[in-house]
Image (spheres, grey):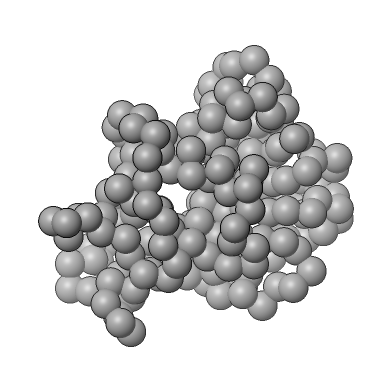
Amino acid sequence: MKIVVLGASGRAGSEITKEAAARGHAVTAVARKPEAIPTAEGVTPIAGDASDAAALAPLLTGADAVISALHFDIPMETLLTAVREAGVPRLLITGGAASLEAAPGVRVIDTPEFPEEWKPFALGGIVALDTLRGVADVDWTFFSPAAFIEAGPRLGRYRTGGDQLVTDANGDSKISFADYAIAMVDELEQPKHSRTRFTAAY
C-alpha cells in the first residue's frame, strides 16, 4: 500500500514508519524536521506542517491510508479536512490511553494515580476521539496504547481490547513503541476496528 505517516520523526511515528516499510509498503514520512525521520528502503521523507490543512492535503493525495502519530495540539478537524480533500479512504490515529476505562465507568484520566501535569495533553486525545466518533464519511481507527508506552524490545506480541485498559496478571499496562507499531500496521493490513477505538498491551 501507499501510506503517509504524519509525525514520522517522533517515537511512535518513527517505529510505525520502519514497521510499514519493512513489510513492503511505500511510506511517505512527513515531519517538520524530515532529517529526523528514520532512513529505510521504501521511506520517502518530506517536510510538512500538519497544522495547515490546505498545505497538507496535497501530501496525502494518492495514499491508501494515512497514519497520524501527531500530538493533539493540532485539532482533529484540521486533519479530517486534509484527508477529505485528498480523498484518502482510511485514517488511523495514534491515540492516548487517558480515555480508556480503568474500571467500569472510570476513565484512566480520572484515577488518582493519573499525573496532573499530563492532563492538558491527555484531554486533547479525548477531544480527538469524541470528534471522530461523530464522523461517518471517513473510515477511521483510533488506537490507544497501553497506560505506559516506552522504548523497549520488539517482542512481536500483544493483546488487544476495546474501550477498557488491557492489563497483565500483575495489573500492569505496558507496551513498547516497537510492538505498538506492529499492532498499528497489523490493523492497517487487516482492518478489524473500522470507525472505532481499540487498544493493545502485553
Image quarter (top left, top right, bottom left or bottom right) of the N terminus: top right
Left or right, 136 with reference to 111? right
- Picture quarter containing residue 78? bottom right
Q: Quadrant of residue 80?
A: bottom right
Q: Is residue 9 above or below residue 164?
A: above
x then y, percent, for residue 195: 64, 67
Q: Position of residue 128 (x, y in %)?
A: 56, 67
State the image quarter where residue 131 is shown.
Answer: bottom right
Specify the farthest residue to the bottom: 105
Position of 159 compared to 28: left or right?
Answer: left
Image point 58% across, 23% down: which residue?
Answer: 22
47, above or below 122, in the image: above
- Residue 124 x, y percent position in the rendering: 48, 65
- The x, y position of residue 58, in whole percent, is 84, 42
Q: Out of 25 and 75, give the one closest to the viewer.
A: 25
Q: Is residue 168 above or below residue 21?
A: below
The residue shown at (69%, 46%) is: 66
**Residue 55 seen by the camera:** no
